[in-house]
Amino acid sequence: MGSPQETTGRQGFGPGRVLGLITSRQAQTRTAIAEVTGLARSTIVQRLDALFEAGLILETDERRPSKGRPSQVLQLNPAAGLIVALDVGEERTRIAVSDLGLRIITERIELLPVGDGPEVILSRITTAIREMIQTAGLADRPIAGIGIGLPAPVDYEAGQVAGWSIMSGWDGYDIRSHLRGEYEAAILIDNDVNLLTLAEHRRYWPDVPHLLYIKAGNGIGSGMIVDRRINRGAQGAAGDIGHAHIRGYGDPLCRCGNLGCLEALVGGWAIARDLHPGQDSGGHGAREIAALVERGDTAALAALRAGGRVLGEAVAYATSLLNPNVIVIGGALATAGDHLVAGVRELIYQRSLPLATRQLRIGPTRFKSRAGIAGAAYLVLDHALDPDNLDQALAQGRHPFRVGVAGS
Amino acid sequence: MGSPQETTGRQGFGPGRVLGLITSRQAQTRTAIAEVTGLARSTIVQRLDALFEAGLILETDERRPSKGRPSQVLQLNPAAGLIVALDVGEERTRIAVSDLGLRIITERIELLPVGDGPEVILSRITTAIREMIQTAGLADRPIAGIGIGLPAPVDYEAGQVAGWSIMSGWDGYDIRSHLRGEYEAAILIDNDVNLLTLAEHRRYWPDVPHLLYIKAGNGIGSGMIVDRRINRGAQGAAGDIGHAHIRGYGDPLCRCGNLGCLEALVGGWAIARDLHPGQDSGGHGAREIAALVERGDTAALAALRAGGRVLGEAVAYATSLLNPNVIVIGGALATAGDHLVAGVRELIYQRSLPLATRQLRIGPTRFKSRAGIAGAAYLVLDHALDPDNLDQALAQGRHPFRVGVAGS
DNA sequence: AATCTTATGTACGATCATCGACATAATGCT
DNA sequence: AGCATTATGTCGATGATCGTACATAAGATT
């Protein structure tokens, strides 16, 4: 006991990192934290005092029994702040307000066609948020941040839509400035698939360093966790494989104007198109397929399985390139029975290298309909609880959730 | 001047990070460092004293002129330690000893078939290193680390070959333990293509966050820098695209036993096979092609260009997935004229999304034959100069290059 | 019920990092 | 040559941080 030089090596354990130990459940009692950090317990008490004073932590009812006095379990104070999570879709936007424990307090879905442009949409969203917070009687709680998922490539640093997409009129629009007038919280904007990926990772695979997420809905997209962090790529376009060209399946016309895109082969609209040529599914092929599978339509079922194999080609290649620990498949097509996932699995195990597949786990997402919102919330949480941000704010006596500089 | 709250926010500027400012050329004089860090100049002098004492930095002859007393430019002391870099190939191993400025002091190439197994090879390498250091009169200099590139998937943390490859008999062999008896320096082992990627990034594109490297030689491999760091994947197999299946080119037999691998289409041996069916190039197709192109052989030239287009399909898909800033193409095929690169470029600009390609730069590597060694050296340098390692060592009064715990 | 064991609260002193001030050095400018 | 200007060297004061020591709390054990 008390062997020398047993420090954790790395110094610099500010309040932020201590909070990190608590939220990550690595150490939740005072003595445990002292042991893990190697710091004196008195020092830890100092850190915790700062966190108590800022209202960031609470003592739980729970006590860990021991042979002596039981220890008090500490916890992030869920009521320390609100998280506003937005999942912006092509036609509908899901708005949720949750606490720091990611428990949703209010939720609403607004019909807002993104084509109406950012001014209109953002104003209506702002109104909705204000109403929701008022109605729920939460007006006094500080907002830890606003997380927004958009169906477009996003320049995460700049907080702007980064290029061509369904969101015409949004490209380059300064979303943060628009909302900054209303809120002085951090505003974090990301691509929707990235947020699905983040949610999946944080919720179900937090210990895994590399995860590949495939969204198979009406369109096809992907996101990836590399070394425990989202990879957004140079322009925020990483994961945009929907319009990658896939040889050998007859190059059908894609809605982007090119031929033979992955999406034109296995996107929901494409599978619907192949199931009953001539008819127009009205752009909601994925939902239609899901409905058919529900009814046990064998043609739809076979189409999904075949689509899975085509998708599997693309995923197999991505597997060779990225060598993930886990592949998660989401989107309307993935959750319509196990058929798409089965097709993908089939091809991956057939195609990829044994080394890369030996320990690879492939499966459908376990989220129902709130994955996007969860991702947006995790984004905010990760930012709000970031040790550097926190320590800086606490050192300056500033409230940790009030935005510091011009920063994100 | 002296506006309040102008601190760099992040505290914890130990000697390690100060050294980082110097080596990265962000701030090379005492006053400049003080400005950048926001710390008092006297504090910086303390940090520098520690670095001087450890022999890690030097004052250059260079002085930055100003209106008053010119400032002293500081520099990493290249003679503070030796870097041993090993580029292990299938038949030959290149061994280099360099200083911390990455200037090669001695170099040698040994004929060592990896098939002889780790015991034999490593023993002969050890002998060679000892001879080289003795002959060059460097026996008194500490070794900052030994960097090893292997033509196989490598578990970087464990320092072991991770799966099937040409290196039969190496799988799971504990390379570090073998060398640990001889040296007490850090021993860092990585896949050879990862080291090519690292070298390319550090030497030519240090400011770019995302880089994709393609090695087109006899085999095909790749490596990637994601957020300024190498992505090695779950089992160290990231980038292994040589045996990914590519549809639509007739599925020729690959040397791995499968059909239609990328390597079987555009690997050096495959192109040579197509140029003169029936003959056996003796396994050195890439060199043969390079020689033919040198002589102006039009058939070889056309084959290379066509190969570039096929390779381009794979690279285009990787581009969509990763959205890199830069793609560098290396290997014997890439440096044989511009034909392969031209073919790749052609396909990428045709296939990939405009957003991802608008600012994308694609080109051949500028390295000649020492890229592998450079990568191994950078690996060691990054480790030896890692702020956390350094600060810990200095705090303990330990020499920074003597290995601390059992660690890497 | 008394005792043991472990967690927690609090206070004081030692240590360390950091800073500000003053002295000195080296060049450009007049 | 002398002055202005900027870089650097050095030292003591300050303040935060940390650890030890002692006191108290709460349950387990006997």
Image: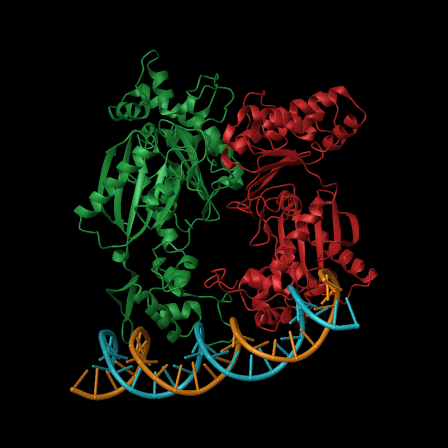
Chain colours: A red, B green, C cyan, D orange
The percent coordinates of residue A391 (x first, y second) are 57, 66
Toward the right, the furthest residue is: A135
User: Which image quadrant for residue A102?
Assistant: bottom right
| Side of A250 relative to B276 (left or right) | right
Q: Residue at x 35, y 21 (%)?
A: B269
The percent coordinates of residue B281 (x first, y second) are 30, 18
User: In which quadrant will I find the C terminus of chain A?
Assistant: bottom right
| Side of A2 relative to A143 (left or right) | left
Toward the top, the furthest residue is: B278
Q: Is residue B39 above or below residue B121?
A: below
The percent coordinates of residue B86 (x first, y second) are 31, 40
| Side of A108 relative to A302 (left or right) | right
**Depth check: B147 or A158 in front?**
B147
**Depth check: B51 or B187 in front?**
B187
User: Which image quadrant for residue A270?
Assistant: top right
Q: Is residue B369 visible?
A: no
The percent coordinates of residue B224 (x first, y second) are 45, 41
Q: Is residue B141 above or below residue A256?
A: below
**Depth check: B108 or C12 in front?**
C12
Q: Is residue C22 above or below residue B145?
A: below
Q: Is residue A275 above or below residue B105?
A: above
Q: Is residue B131 visible?
A: yes
